[in-house]
Image (cartoon, rainbow, N blue to C red):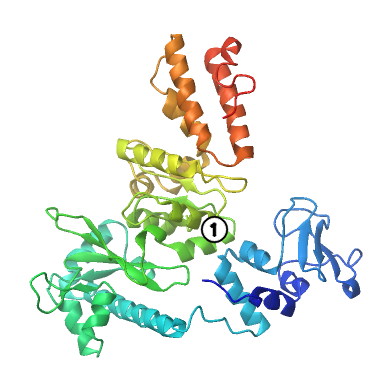
Amino acid sequence: MSLPAGFLDDLRNRVSLSGVVARKVIWDARKSNQGKGDMWAPCPFHQEKSASFHVDDRKGFYYCFGCHAKGDALSFIRETENLGFMEAVEVLAREAGLTMPARDPMAAQKDQARKSLADVMEEAVKFYRLQLATAGGQTARSYLSGRALGPEAQARWDIGWAPDQRQGLFSSLTAKGISADLIVEAGLCAHPDGGGAPYDRFRGRIIFPIRDARGRCVGLGGRSLDPEARAKYLNSPETPLFDKGRSLYNTASAREAAGKGAPLVVVEGYMDVIALSEAGFKSAVAPLGTAVTAEQLQLMWRIHPEPVIALDGDKAGVRAALRVMDLALPLIEAGQGLRFAIMPQGLDPDDLIKQQGPTAMQQVLDSAQPMIKLLWQRETEGRVFDSPERKATLDKSLRAALKTIKDPSIREHYGAEIKELRYRLFGQTNQKSLFRKGQKV
């Protein structure tokens, strides 16, 4: 969303930075001078006893002489409340008594249309929840109970059941006066190729609502109980509300937990997220049936600076982890990295927790490795470097990987770490072969 020129300046001028910060700190009365807008406190971004966090109320900036955190009222709200930029603007605007500007002359109409779609999605969630409680939902309830998800857990996650009926949901929603066009636009139903009345997109599936950072249902995931189904999982199509490449399952709850200090754990599917959360790992998210995208990585980093990628321990899971690594290398920077926790062979987080308990899962997370270790493992594991040609091939592969890192400081540190790893593998005599004097990565 673009904002009118001058809006942010007006917003910052209307609020007192010290007033915003005061909700999170206790001012040091000896060092602070409120009359001059010169305020000091222990830093809210790192643990300390001294007051090294400085707020200059007149300039509207803060700076910590300990951890070097700096910014203005918007960045302070973003960091302390784990919000995106526009969400922080909305919070500050409410405090300042300002109305958020419309993006364009049609903005109000578009926002109302999105609200209408969100309302329809919530009606669908209610329908599916009711269907789960009926006799027709018995098979689904039995399946969920077998996955250690009883009625209370089902309610917490708003899990539902889509009956195997062509127009079960469609008939229910239209009976409430909801238009067929709106139902189709929400992705809940679709028109047949040959024409005719819309049919339910989700049939004979357990339903998992997908909610955005504000808690609104924007899409659905459906898990088939039919082993012969062409697709075990089916997600909502792209809609004005839902873009699966830019969404994560359980974003809102994970962000809240991460804001309280929990690590962000990225797993493969809905059931893994639910199993982790029910076992006490509240800050778990999952991509929505696709490979992780750059947009999803950015969303993860807005939640936590160093997400833990905890994918399955089979070959497919390892390949997925390597794809995430290659995607992330050009994007990493200070305060924006990844760690990787590979599950035991043949187990996903749900299996591990059920078989060995939460302690075993915690041990896996505690053993998570930095991304550079995964890079080194990919290039060296199972290989023998007993000739100059093989060693040169390794050097070439590592150089190619390092060249993708855009941040010069991160690239330099990766190069230094790889030199150390090469020393352990080859010995000192080969240390100069990867980066010759004057050679740039």
Q: In this view, does 243 lie above or below 120?
A: above
Which quadrant would residue 164 be assigned to in this image?
A: bottom left
Q: Which residue is drawn at 53% across and 39% down?
A: 405
Image quarter where the C terminus lies is: top right
Q: Type of residue at label 1?
A: Arg
Question: Residue at position x 19%, y 69% from top?
Answer: 201
Residue nearer the viewer, 142 or 55? 55
Count of numbered labels shown in the rendering: 1
Residue at far left of view: 194
Quarter assignment of residue 382: top left
* Viewer-closest of 48 and 245: 245
Where is residue 61? Give x, y as percent: 76, 64
Depicted 285 relative to depicted 99: above or below: above
Q: Is residue 199 left or right of residue 58?
A: left
Task: Please name the residue shown 64% across and 38% down the image.
Answer: 409
**Residue corresponding to mark 1:** 302
Rendering quarter of residue 119: bottom left
* Relative to 197, 358 lies left or right: right
Q: Position of residue 304 (x, y in %)?
A: 55, 54
The one of 293 and 213 positioned closer to us in this rendering: 293
Residue 45 visible? The answer is yes
| Horizontal and vertical percent position of residue 33 | 90, 70
User: How far across and how far down the image is residue 106, in percent?
Assistant: 43, 83
Residue 385 visible to the viewer: no
Q: Nearer the viewer, residue 406 or 128?
A: 406
- Label 1 neighbour load within 10 Å: few <14, some 14-19, many 20+: some
Q: Is residue 23 found left or right of 387 in the rendered image?
A: right
Is the residue 7 above or below the residue 438 in the image?
below
